[in-house]
Image (spheres, rainbow, N blue to C red):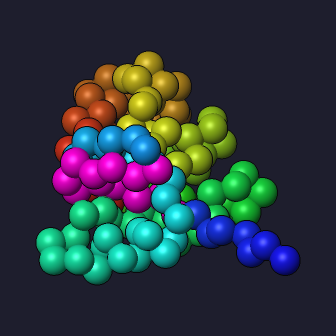
Amino acid sequence: MSEEIQMVEVQALYSIKYNGKYYEPKTVFPMDIETASKLNDQEPAKVLVLEDVELSEGNKDNSEVKELFMQLDNMEESFADQLIEKGFDSFEKLQEAKEQDLLNVKGIGKKLAGKLIKEISETELG
């Protein structure tokens, strides 16, 4: 009987090779929890675990995604809720957001959108 492998979302802190692919620092990608745990426990840590939930859409808990978004200084709860509703259901997807995506959120103007884009690109959540 095969066991289902639990995956987590991680951010590379250094250049690493995983499953035949190279990931540059700050890249967010899925990794099996066992490998992520080993790499996270090394000194220095090679990856930062962003989510301790399985990444399949059926199991993704939006409250945990919202909690990640709320770690951003300029993020408000209503903004996080709207972003999740618009399909930004992971930090990786939020990092890919364009200014126009954020301007479509009620309450976010051009100035705040710019601040959020800058903050998202510079933030390592965990």
Q: Is residue 17 magenta?
A: yes
Is residue 89 rendered to the left or right of residue 73?
right
Tell me the quarter of the picture where residue 115 sits. top left
Where is 59 relative to 87, above or below? Answer: below
The residue nearer to you, when weighing 94 against 27, is: 27
The quadrant in which the C terminus is found is bottom left
The quadrant in which the N terminus is found is bottom right
Is residue 51 rendered to the left or right of residue 58?
left
The span picked out in magenta is: 8-19
- Coordinates of residue 34 in the picture (x, y in percent): 49, 75
Residue at 33 percent of width and 49 percent of height: 17
The residue nearer to you, when weighing 72 against 111, is: 72
Q: Is residue 110 visible?
A: yes
Is residue 1 rendered to the left or right of residue 103?
right
Where is 95 relative to 17, above or below? Answer: above
- Coordinates of residue 77 in the picture (x, y in percent): 48, 56
The prevailing secondary structure element of the residues shown in magenta is strand
Q: Is residue 70 visible?
A: no
- Coordinates of residue 16 in the picture (x, y in percent): 28, 51
Where is 56 relative to 6, above or below? Answer: above
Residue at 15 percent of width and 72 percent of height: 44
Residue at 44 percent of width and 19 percent of height: 100
The residue nearer to you, when weighing 47 against 34, is: 34
Where is 116 relative to 2, above or below? Answer: above
**Residue at the outermost right position:** 1
Q: Is residue 1 magenta?
A: no
